[in-house]
Amino acid sequence: MDLKELKGAVKKIVHNSGAKLVGVGSRERLKEAPPSGNMDYCLPGAQSCIIFAYPNPIEALESYFSKKERMSLKKVLHDSYTNAWKAAQNIAELIEKNTEYTTFPVIPNLKYRKEDKKAFSNVFKADIAYPDFSLRYGAVAAGLGHIGWSGNLVTKEYGGSLFLGGVLTTAPLEPDPMAEENYCNKCKICIKACTSGYPSMDEEENTQEVIIGGQKEIYSKRGTYTKCGISCAGLAGLSEDGTWTIWSPNHICLKKISSEDWQDLKVRQKIIVEILNNPSENIQKVNKELLKSFALAAKRENMALLSLEQREFPRCGNCAFICVSSPSKRAELYKMLTSSGKVYIDDEGKEYVKKIDENGNEITYYPPTLEEYFSKKK
Ligand code: SF4
Ligand code: SF4
C-alpha cells in the first residue's frame, strides 16, 4: 500500500466511524508548538498526526442548554469518545499490518503526562495538566480549524462543539492544507456561558506561545485549572446574576471568588472544603458521588473506556458545547441557558429543575434519569 492509498484507507475508517471531519498534520507544523504538541513524547520519530472530529447534534444541545434533559448529550459524548478510540485503534492496525510504519492511537480524554506532578490526579492542587498529545494542537496542524477564544478548536463547519480523536504515525502522509481563517468571531458567548471564570473575558493567555504551522494561536487567559475542574465535575456552578446553574445543585458562583484566593493553595483548599460541605446533606451526598465517580474515571485514564452509567459527564462543558458554527444559533443556545433556571436535588437524590416559563410562572419538573430516558427510547 503506497502512502496515497494508505491516507485514503485511513480516512475511510474515520468516516465509517461517524466522524464528520478528518485531516492530516505534519511534524514540521508542530515544531514550534508547546510540549504537548511534541509527537515524539508518544511516538519517537512520528511524522504525521491524523485528527478527526465528531460534532454535537443541535437537538441534543438544545435539550442540554434549556435543561429539558442532559441524557441525549451524554449519549453523544459516550458514542463520540467510544467511536474515536475504536477508529484510532483500527487505523493503527491498518497501518501496522500493511506498512513498515508504527503508530500511537491517542486516548481521546483523561490521559495526562505522568512526570508532571501537577497532573489531573491532583486536580484540586493543579494549575495546569498536560495530555500525552494535545488533540487540539494536532487538529490545527491537520487543517481542521484554529484555536478560538475559548481555547478550544473552532472549525468552519461545526464551530467548537465537537469531540476529537487522533492517531500519530511514523508514516510521512501528505498533510492537508491548514485552515485559512480562524472561524472564532470573538463573540465571547463561551466565556459568558462559563460560571467558573476559568477563561478570561478580555485578557490573552501569555504563559506560553502556541505556534502551529508558523501561525500564532491566540486565546483567553486561563485562571487556576481547579476552577474549571470543579464546575466541569458538576460540584458547583451558578451564574453571576444567580438566575441559572450548570447541571449542578450546588448554587455557588465560582466567578465571584477572586483570582488571588484561587492561587493561594491554602485558601483554595478551604474554598474547596466549603464547596463540598454545602450545609444541605443532599448536596453533600451528590458531591461525594461525583468525587467517587471522577476518582474512578481518573484512575481509568481513558474516557472512552467508561460505560454510559459510570460517567457523570456532562454537567458543564458549556464553553465548547455552545460554540456551534452559526453565530445566531450560538446566541439562541445562550438565551436558552440564561432562562433555563436552576438544578436542585430532592431527598431521594433525584435532580429537578425550577425555572420561569414563557408566561412568567415558576415551574418545577424532573428531567429524565438515565434509566428513564433510555427506557422511553426503546
Ligand atoms: S463562542 Fe464565540 S468567542 Fe468563544 S470560541 Fe466560539 S466563536 Fe470564539
Ligand atoms: S468546562 Fe465549564 S467551567 Fe470549564 S471552562 Fe468550560 S464552561 Fe468554564
Image (spheres, rainbow, N blue to C red):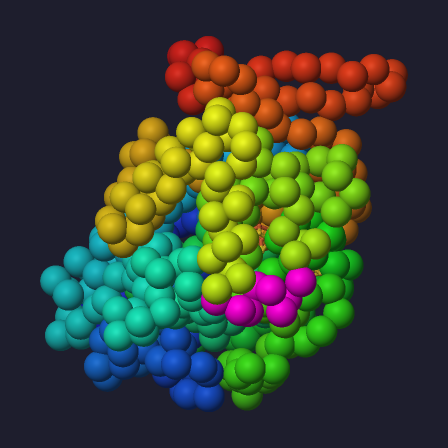
Left-right relation of 281 to 357: left
Task: Residue at 64% x, 66% y: name it.
Answer: 259
Q: Up-down: is 28 above or below 8? A: below
**Residue lying at 46% horizontally and 83% vertically, measured from the top left:** 33
Question: Which quadrant would residue 204 be assigned to in this image?
Answer: bottom right
User: Is residue 172 magenta-colored?
Assistant: no
Judge whether residue 92 can be spotted in this image: yes
Foreground of the two, 238 or 372: 238
Res 197 → quadrant: bottom right
Q: Quadrant of the N terminus?
A: bottom left
Q: Is residue 154 left or right of residue 46?
A: right
Q: Which residues are magenta?
A: 258-265
Residue drawn at x 40%, y 17% is 371
Question: At which x and y percent is residue 142?
Answer: 46, 70
Above-or-below relation of 135 to 85:
below
User: What kind of secondary structure does the magenta stretch mostly adopt?
Assistant: helix
- The reply to whether residue 155 is visible in this rendering is no
Residue drawn 35% across the image and 61% down it: 122
Please state, as top left, top right, bottom left or bottom right, where the C terminus lies in the image: top left
Percent position (x, y) of residue 304? Answer: 31, 46
The x, y position of residue 264, in whole percent, is: 53, 69
Near-viewer residue (2 or 168)? 168
Quarter of the image for residue 338 reads: top right
